[in-house]
Image: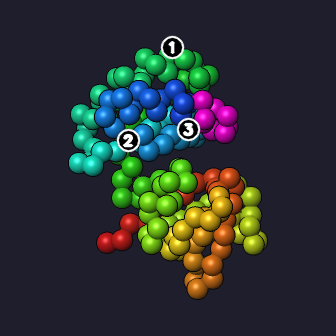
Amino acid sequence: MPTSLKHETWDVLQPTIEGLGYEFVGVEYVGQAGRNTLRIYIDTAAGVTLEDCEVVSHHISGLLDVEDLIGGTYDLEVSSPGLDRPLFKIVDFERFVGQRVKIRLATPADGRRNFAGQLLGVENDHICIEVDGQIFKLDYKQIERARLVPQY
């Protein structure tokens, strides 16, 4: 999903979702084999039920049709972030300091795009992660995707 479209979609959806009493975790647009999916992640302190997803889906599907932000056909999914919660915002990285994460960059840093390790913190729009005893400071703007790694 292009960054400008992601921001537009975020700006349109966030007030509605939060107005319904849910945390708007983030949005992903995935295109695979001719099938496009707009995935919206929501959360609450009590967790997310199927009914919660239905309520949010009902409210935002009409909004998305009216705003017509995404051209063409796509499937709308509303989901809990799950145990491997995606991290979208700087505050997400701050919130989960100490957790294990996987980060994929849009362009390589230090000769690599994929990092998996312990999230150490945020410094001046850089995400600090320890991977195999080495500390990396990754530019937040270069992060393509990031997720928590569940600990069982």
Q: Give residue 52's position: percent from left, percent from top.
A: 27, 35
Q: Secondary structure at mark 1?
A: helix
Residue 66's tag is: 1
Q: Could you tell me if residue 112 is visible in this image? A: yes
Nearest to N terminus: mark 1 or mark 3: 3
Q: In the picture provided, is 75 more to the left or to the right than 129?
A: left
Question: Is the residue 12 above or below the residue 91 in the image?
Answer: above
Question: Gap in Å between the C-alphas at discs 2 and 3?
Answer: 19 Å
Question: Gap in Å between the C-alphas at discs 1 and 3?
Answer: 18 Å
Question: Gap in Å between the C-alphas at discs 1 and 2?
Answer: 23 Å
Nearest to N terminus: mark 2 or mark 3: 2
Q: Give residue 119's position: percent from left, percent from top.
A: 51, 70
- At x 63%, y 53%, the residue is 144
* Quarter in which the C terminus is drawn: bottom left
- Magenta part of the chain: 1-8
Location of mark 2 (residue): 23
Hey, what amino acid is under mark 3?
Answer: Tyr
Q: Secondary structure at mark 2?
A: strand
Residue 30, quarter of the rendered image:
top right
Say which of marks 1 and 2 sits in front.
Answer: 2
Q: Give residue 78's position: percent from left, percent from top.
A: 39, 36
Count residues near mark 2 (Cα–Cα under 10 Å), then give few for <14, some for 14-19, many for 20+.
some
Location of mark 3 (residue): 29
Residue 51, quarter of the rendered image:
top left
